[in-house]
Amino acid sequence: MIQRLAVALALSACCAFAADDVVRPKTGAELKGKITRLEIDGLTIEAGGATKTLRADEVAGFTLGDIPSKQRDAETAMNGRNFEEAVKSYTAALGELKPGRGDMHRQFVYQGLVRALKAKNDPDAAIEGVLKFLKECPKAWNYVETAREGIDVAMQKSNDAKAKEIINAMRAAADPMKGFGAIEHARMQIKGRDFGGAQSTLSAIANNNNQPYATDAKVWLIRAMRGKKDTASLDPLCKGIVATKGAPAALLQAACSGLGDALMEKAKGGDKSAIHDAILAYAQAISIGPPPKDSAPDDYASALLNIAKCYTQAGQAAGKPEAVVAAKSKAMGYYVEVMQKYSETEWGAAAKKEYDALSGAGGSPDGEQK
C-alpha cells in the first residue's frame, strides 16, 4: 500500500495536455488509452481496442492525461510553496469536477487539498478534508494513504478523538477499507501500549489472505505480540513466515525481528545456543534494509538495537578479553547506525543510552545506570 502514495504523486508530473492515460504494469509493456475505473482494489483501462483490468498490486504506476486546469494550478502553487493559493485552487478544482471522469480525479484533488492545508499549518481543516474525502470517495485508489495522513495529523495534534473519527469511518466501510481501518485502530492501540487489544484486533483479520491488507495486518500483529512479549504465539508465527518462499520484504523483516525476540527470551531461560540464533535472525532482518521513510521503522531499528545487545552478551559469555572487545566494537557500530538514521526517535534515544554505557560514559551494557 505504501507504494500507492508514489503512484498518486506521479499525477503531478504528468503532461497536462496528453490525450491518453498511461498505465505501467509491474510486468509487461505500458498501456496507453483511457482508464475507466481507478479504485482501491485496482484499475481498468481501455487500450488498443481491448479492456485490461489490473489488481492494485500489479500496477507500478500510472498517469492521467486530462488533469483539471485548477488542479494543475494548485500543483504549480504547491511547487512554489504558495500554500494559500494551492488551497484556493484545489477547492476550485472540486467545484469544476463533473460526474463520470471527474469522479476519478476527485480523489486526487482531495488528497492535494489535504496536503496543502497541512503545509499551510491548518491541521483542523486538513482533518475535515479527510473526513469529506472518505465520504465522497468511498472506494478511492488513494483511500488508505489519504486516511492515514489525516490520522497522523490528528495524532500529531494530540487529537485522538478526530483520529478515532477517521478510523471509525474506515471501519464502517466495506472491505478492504474496513480491514485497513482495523489496522489503523490497532496502530492506535499499540501507540497506547494496549498490545493485547491490538493483538486481538489484528488476529481477526490477519489471515484474510484474499484481501490487500493481509500483509500489513500480519506485520502489525507481530509488533503487537512483541510488545506484549507473547513469545508462545510469536515463535511459531514468525517461523512459519520465515520459511515461506516469496514472503513480502516488510513481512519477512518483521518476522525475523520477532523470531530474534523469541530466541532472546529462550537465551534468558538458559538456552546457550539461542543467543547465536537470535543474532542470525536479527542479521536477516537487517539485511532486508531500512524501510521507506514513510513506513514505521520498528522492525529494522529494533533488530539493530537487539543484535547489538546479543553481541555484547555473546562477547561476555565467551570470557576472553579479545572476544569482549570485538563484540563491543560490533555492538557500538550498530548503535551508531541507529543514532544516525533515527536520531529524533525513541530508537535513537535508546541507542544513545546503550552506546554511552558501552563507551564508558556511565551505566552498564544493557543501558541501566549504575
Image (spheres, rainbow, N blue to C red):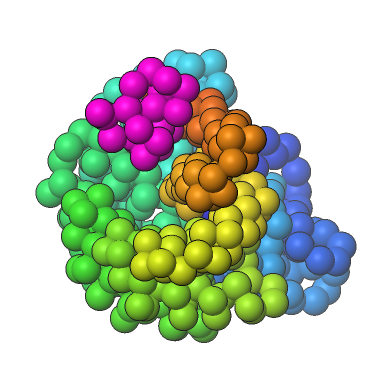
- The residue sitting at 72% across, 37% down in the picture is 15
Q: Quadrant of residue 172?
A: bottom left
**Image location (x, y in percent) of residue 120:** 34, 22
Is residue 352 visible to us here? no
The residue nearer to you, when weighing 276 against 212, is 276
Q: Quadrant of the C terminus?
A: top left
Q: Is residue 175 left or right of residue 55?
A: left
**Image location (x, y in percent) of residue 222:** 41, 66
**Image location (x, y in percent) of residue 21:** 72, 54
Up/down of 196 relative to 366, above or below: below
Is residue 45 visible to us here? yes
**Image location (x, y in percent) of residue 173:** 30, 71
Q: Residue furthest front?
A: 320
Q: Residue furthest left?
A: 161
Up/down of 350 relative to 343, above or below: below
The residue nearer to you, when weighing 87 against 94, is 87
- The residue sitting at 64% across, 78% down in the picture is 244
- The residue sitting at 21% across, 34% down in the picture is 157
Q: Is residue 69 left or right of residue 26?
A: left
- The residue sitting at 37% across, 62% down in the picture is 268
Check residue 203 for magenta coloring.
Answer: no
Q: Is residue 73 left or right of residue 199?
A: right
Bounds of the magenta segment: 345-370
The residue nearer to you, when weighing 320 against 152, is 320
Number of on-image labels: 0
Up/down of 126 relative to 180, above or below: above
